[in-house]
Structure formats: structure tokens, C-alpha cells
Image (cartoon, rainbow, N blue to C red):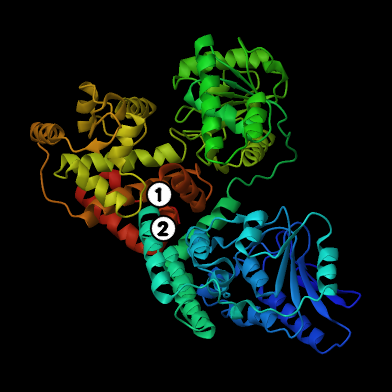
Amino acid sequence: MSNTVVSSHLGDCLLLTLDNPPVNALTREILEQLAAAISEAAKQDAIQAIILTGAGKAFVGGADIRAFPKIVAGELPPIEWQSLVNAVEDSPKPIIAAINGAALGGGLELAMACHWRVAARTAALGQPEVKLGLIPGAGGTQRLPRLAGTELALKMIAFGDPLTAEEALHAGIVDQLVDGDLVQAVIAMVASGAAVRRTRELTSKLLSPAEAESLAALFLDQCRKRMPSQTAPLAGIECVAATSRLPFPEGLAYENRRFEECLYGSQSQALIHIFFAERAAGKLEASRLSPVQRAAVAGAGMMGSGIAMCFANAGIPVLLTDTSATHLERALETIRKNYEATARKGRLTQADVEARLALIQTVPDFEGFETADLVVEAVYEELSLKQRLFLDLDRIARPGAILATNTSTLNIDAIAAVTRRPESVAGMHFFSPANVMRLLEVVKGRASAPETLATLLDTGRRLKKVCVLSGNCFGFIGNRMYAPYRAQAVSLIERGCSVQQVDAAITSWGFAMGPLAVGDLVGLDVYWLIRQAALQAGLPHTPVTTFEDELYKLGRYGQKTRSGWYLYDDARRPSPDPEVERLVREYASWQGIEQRQWNEREIRERCLLALINEGGRLLEEGIAEKPSDIDIVLVHGFGFPAWRGGPMHYAESLGLDNVRRRLDALYDEEGPQWKPALWR
């Protein structure tokens, strides 16, 4: 039975096994059962100690997050996390945690309330709540500093990264590591005289109040730089610092207040929305799928090289070809440098580097491509070139092999039409750099078979990508939405804003980069080509001309030419360019564009409403299956702040009626580009 605590007797020990697949997430029911079992064990003289472990491969992967939105909505009463976990620490008989796998979030809090902790060498321990806009709420901010010290507790709670079992042992969180049978090791510990030892009573690692506050100030400064505008990291730091000045019960009360502030705040609701959206994206029912055992990539540029690395990282052998032997040689050199840079940061061993390189084989003229289950095309964004390549791939690839195009804008059906297997053709749009960016758009053509799409989604998950299924249109979900957003930014420049003013309004709201700085990074020549293709494809509301054309004509392509919207030094650091300001005012005068002053709120509103409304159009047209898919694409592919939940979640938070009224007003003032989409 799942969602339960299973009891069994092992001599004079009581074994309590938490069983809630797949990761033994903590629920109210499990914690209540656990507290009742401990209370009953306290009455039985035959029981000397209690062993707590998890069923399957996890100890406890955290709290059941599904409960949080229901608590916030008033559909469930709040859970007394602290009192239920305190029941473990209050036990008069020793409780030993046998940490057989991940002990994360509430799982680590539960383990720290046990009197001793024995872990498998493969276990991972951490407090990742900050990644959901929360802080530990079951005593974690008060117990972790007592076990690991203030500095490590601050680091774990502020940034959310887990420790290995070895690191946890060294820190004092874990008392013993075991390679074999954990439960037998705990029984031996009990036999050797393990007694009750309550974490709340440990004080030797706590700093003085002044030392704790000084250290907390450093962490607060780091968090404001690394995670600007996010509230949970700051709340977690302040709770950890409180351990040095407050008695344990008062520290718990302070943690509880700060936890509730986070839980009922907009940031945790947005991040929990993204958490569930990631898991709901890319789901497709299919009668079967064919797991990819061997892949091939045609095109060894930056994108093709990155895609090859994705396959190698997942343990899938991959062939890489290009029309130029020089390009192939350069690609392999770049791939090796990327892996070695990762190794220098301690994220790979040298053995890992060599193993992954061994999975990538460069070949001439499609040699061996007939053995691949999946061939990914990654050549220049030109339809006729891709069609010629697909003619060759269709001839060479084995029957049943999938042919995927990495196009970011082009028509999947036009590419599939030149093959004899359109049912086995689809888009597999990686984002650059492919070996770093988590997003993958799988694009269904008119003839793409469900089995083809299911296989590509399965492959994307094996590559550790967040996969979203998109319909076939110009730019698919991400690039289609980003176009009107950038167009609005350029329009604001033409109407009186400065370049810095527009970008600052967006980055101060939470975006990783402003839309104009993004243009310089990608290349204004690239955006010019995309807009010409959009015009040719008949994409509505695409501006025929913009001031950005003038920068393109002047050869100001952005970072690659050291000038675009900004000027760039040799290290590609930007600085404002007065020449752009002069040129744009001349352009506005020539075009008769009225100039006025704009404030931050107006700039953000126009850019964000353009983004939201285009998302609505994608839902109307059936290109995106659900609003949360759009949110995932913009968060993982375009730097939309995850703690705001993506554009469609943000629209919901504003109230869709309010969004509609504002779009109606802009439609009346400025015309068709603001015609509201009706996606509800």
C-alpha cells in the first residue's frame, strides 16, 4: 500500500519504512502515521530503538508539493510540519535514520530530527526549497546549523544545492556511511549503545549573534546579486542567522512565520506552477515508441556540435558529419575543450571526458548514417538547403529511422514533403548552446506520426531536456512569441525611449537580459533575416521596416561587430552609444513618429502584453496545447523570470479580464497589432 508507514520488527528494533512512490514524498497522513507509530513504540518495553528508512531508492525526496497550492487556495488546512517532525526528535527511544537514497527538503528535515543518521554512500542530502520559492518549514533552518555549522547551512538553504553523502559525513550531518546493508548497520549501531541525542540540544557549531549576522550579511549580498528580487533566499538566510540569537522554540516560531510568508507569496506560487508545468509538458499518448540507440547529426557548426554533445552526455553513440573536413576537425576540438572546461570545474572526471568523447565519431559523407535510429539536421537556416539535405538523408537512412530538423522557424511540412517518409519527420528545435540550454521544442508536422513524436519526446527526456510539443508555424512557440515582444521594444525606441531605458525596465523586472541586448548577442543580422522570412511567410503584425534595419544596413550586427544597439570593447562589455541615439531620432523625424516620455511601467506593460497576447494567439491556433507549455518555453528558452511563472501564469495573476481590458484600450489607440486573443 502506498502513502503509508510500514512497520516490522527486527529483534528489539522497530523498522518504520516510509512508502509513498516514487520518492516517498511526505504527506500529512504519513507524518501522522509516523508520529502514532513512535508514540506506540514508546510504550513497548521490548522495543529498544526505532529505525526509519524509505521504500525503494529514496529516503524521502521532500514534501508532497501537490498539497501547497491547495493549502494556499484554502482547499486543505495547513499542515503542522514542525510539530509532526518534532514528534520524532521527542521520542524517548533512539531513532536512527537509515538514509538509503535522496533525503531532500522535508526528507532531510525529518532525518535531522532523528537522533542518528546512517547513509548509503550513494545518497544525496539537501534543502532545495528555495528553488520553489520556499524555505525549510519543518525545523530545517534551526537544525541544520546545529549539525553542519552556520556557514554551510547558509549555503545549502540560500542556494539549494545538495551534498553528496561523503560531503554530508564530513559536515557532520551524517554520522556514518555504509556500502552494504543499511538496516543491519543500524542494528549494529543500536547494539553498540546508540542513545537518544537530540539535534536541538547541539550548540557547539553555532556562532555568536554578531558572527552569524556578519556572515548572513555576506550571503544576503551574494543572493541579491545572483538571484535579484527573489525573497525566499533572503528569508532562509535570516532564519539561519536567528539560530544564534533565539532559543530553539523561538527559532522554530520565526521559521514558521517566514515559511508562511513564502508559501502564500506570489513567487512560490509561480515557481510551483513551473515545477508542475515541466512535468506536464511533452506528454503524448502513443501506441508505441522506438527508443533511440544510435544517433547521427548532419552539420558540425556550433549547434550541431552541441547536439552531438547532448547525445554523448546521455550515453548515446552519435555520428557527426559536415561537408567540410575542417569544420569537423574544429567541431571535435571545440567539443573536447567544452568537456575539459567542465572537468576543470569539477563537474566531470577525466575518465568521464574520455568516455563521452569516445561516443562522438566524426565521419565523412554520411558514413554509417544508415545505422542511426535518429538523424538530426543542424545546417544553415535556409529552406532549399535543408530540403536538399533531407533528400539525401531520406535515401541514406534506414527504413523506420526518424529524420528531425533543428530549424528554428521554417515550415516542417515543406521539409518533410521532399521525403518518402513524412510520417517520420518532425522538428527537434534545440536552443543555443544546445549542450547547455534545457529547452527542446518537438514540432509536429501535418504528417508526423504519434510514434515519431513520442520517440522524440522520450529522447529529449533522456537528454535531460525540458520538452514541449509545438504545432507547426513560423517560429513555433518561442521564436513566434519573442518577435512581437522585441518589435515592441524597438517601437518604444522609435517613440522616444533610450536603449538603456528599455533594457533596464525589463531586466529590473527580472529578465536575464533586455530585448535589445539580446539582439546584439544573437546578431541583428540574424534578426533581420528572421523578420524577412516572417514577412515572406505572411506572419501577421510583422513590421515591414523598423529602425533596426538601419543598424543592419550600417553593418552594426551587435557583439560580433563590436557595435549594434550598444558599443562593445574587446571583452564584449557593453556601453551606451550616442550615435545610436542620434540615428534613431533622425529616423523618427524622417518617419514622422511622435516622440514622448515613457516610464518603466509603460515600457514593461507594452513589452509584456505583446508577449502575453501572442501566447494567446498560439493557444487560439492550437500551436501550443496549454498555457503552461508557453510558460516553460519562455522561462527555459528566453530568460523569463521563473519566479514570475511565465507570461501566461503572469497574465492569470493580473486577472485575464484586466489584461483583456488593457489590450482593448491599446487596440483602440494603436490598431490591429493589439487585437486581443481569446484563449480562455
Q: Residue at x 20, y 47 (%)?
A: 501
Residue 354 horizontal side relative to residue 612, left or right: right
Q: Can you give x and y, in whole percent of width and height, for residue 477 in the image?
A: 46, 40
Question: Which amino acid type corresponds to the residue marked 1 in the rendered image?
Answer: Phe
On screen, residue 278 above or below 261: above
Residue 140 horizontal side relative to residue 57, left or right: left
Q: Is label 2 in contact with label 1 (beta carbons under 8 Å)?
A: yes
On screen, residue 261 above or below 155: below
Q: Is residue 448 something that shows in the picture?
A: no
Quarter of the picture containing the N terminus is bottom right
How far apart in space, not on screen, are marks 2 and 1 (Cα)? 8 Å
Q: Residue 162 falls in which quadrant of the image?
A: bottom right
The label shown at residue 640 is 1
Q: Can you give x and y, in whole percent of width and height, for residue 154 in the image?
A: 48, 64
Around disc 2, counting alpha carbons within 10 Å, would you say few (fewer than 14), some (14 to 19), or many (20 or more)? many
Q: Residue 656 falls in which quadrant of the image?
A: bottom left
Secondary element under disc 2, as helix, strand or loop, is helix
